[in-house]
Image: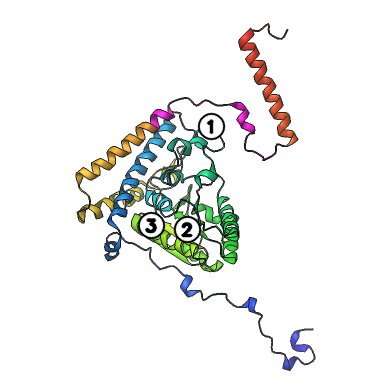
Amino acid sequence: MTVQELPGAAAYRPTPPPAWKPITDPAPLLPDPEPYRVLGTDAVADVDPELLLRLHAELVRGRRYNAQATALTKQGRLAVYPSSTGQEACEIAAALVLEERDWLFPSYRDTLAAVARGLDPVEALTLLRGDRHTGYDPRERRIAPLCTPLATQLPHAVGLAHAARLKGDDVVALAMVGDGGTSEGDFHEALNFAAVWKAPVVFFVQNNGFAISVPLAKQTAAPSLAHKAVGYGMPGRLVDGNDAAAVHQVLSEAVARARRGEGPTLVEAVTYRMEAHTNADDATRYRVDSEVEAWKAHDPVRLLERELTERGLLDDAGIEQAKEAAERMAAALRDRMNADPELTPMDLFTHVYAEQTSQLQEQAAALRAELDAEQDHDEHGPEAGR
């Protein structure tokens, strides 16, 4: 029996409950049709020149950091390195828009963002070197661990931000993810919870064109990744990811919005990964050299240098000064990474659980016995213990 067949159906006029209605007008949540730009437009006149110069210095340093870390993989000092060359504007802006009390939740490619936030360059590479779980204290640095699982950091960012707000702490979490990570379930869950709770989170997607070898067109049919925001009830912003000033402005606005208690924002930065996915990848198998060359004309370092020189804010001496500072950083990084680390095997069991499980206790005891036996052998020779 249908509703229409029930007695009194003629008088039945169902009214959808409030939950059926859109919570917000979707129009203001939609991103602009084209990525927002500042460099080369009238908007650049409103940007603090000191900020532009700082962005430039950090971009130059970041470019050199990527090159040095990539070289370390070829020298056997790093197991792997996912370079962010070409994406430095995104990395630097993400670090600079946060206050010290805020949290950064990076993906595995966001080593540069962590370094720009103040993390020791060697500590940022500890995981990729295979020395420890992570090379720094996340609580002290306010930087979540750099790790390779895709998008798992996004729900963590939401949980931390929501908890901070419940405690009354003025904290914003900025969670970084690649375009490939938006295809993970964690992405959906994080955005959904963040929007419902109005958690102070900024989701920052670096759309560099490929999820390893999979182009964006094979991941989604959406007009842009920023358009996905409207489905969760948050604003979506689309920005030129190679325009450092534009990325900094858009992220700053999103962080300020979150801090005011207005909820999360999804920001998509359209950029390009100039190098291979990692040193273990052959990018020539899925993209052509002409595409890479075309993007070199939109290089974030060149774009900012051109703007600064045309406005008389930067000359050849200033450019050389930034390069020299970057070289000093690279030399120090190289020297420290070429020194063999002093490792303690028992650290394998540190920071796994707050309280070790019985299995871990057994494994730790077995390893300790092996180490003691090896030390005894070294000190007393093969006859020791007989």
Instruction: Look at label 3 and name its amino acid.
Output: His
Residue 350 seen by the camera = yes
Looking at marks 2 and 1 on the same chain, the residue that comes earlier in the sequence is marked by: 1
According to the picture, the residue beneath numbered tag 1 turns out to be 131
Q: Which residues are magenta?
A: 333-354
Asked where in the image residue 285 lies, by quadrant, the reply is top left
Nearer to the camera, 19 or 270: 19
Q: Residues within 10 Å of mark 2 (few under 14, many from 20)?
A: few
Q: Is residue 13 above or below residue 164?
A: below
Q: Are marks 3 and 2 in contact (CB under 8 Å)?
A: no
**Residue 71 in magenta?**
no
Q: Residue at x 42, y 31 (%)?
A: 74
Q: Amino acid at mark 2?
A: Ala
User: Does label 3 or label 1 sit earlier along the sequence?
Assistant: 1
Residue 3 location, x and y as percent? 75, 85
* Disc 2 element: helix
Query: Residue 166 in the image: x percent, y percent?
Result: 60, 60
Element class at badge 3: helix
Helix, strand or loop for disc 1: loop
Who comes first in sequence, dot 3 or dot 2? 2
Dot 3: within a 10 Å radius of its alpha carbon, few (fewer than 14), some, or many (20 or more) residues?
Answer: many
Quadrant (top left/top right/bottom left/bottom right) for the C terminus: top right
Of labels 3 and 2, the one closer to you = 3
Label 2 sits on residue: 217
Which residue is disc 3 drawn over? 248
* Image spot of residue 247 (x, y percent): 38, 57
How many angstroms separate mark 3 from mark 1 (CA)?
A: 33 Å
Mark 3–mark 2 distance (CA, rounded to whole Å): 27 Å
Q: Nearer the viewer, mark 2 or mark 1?
A: 1
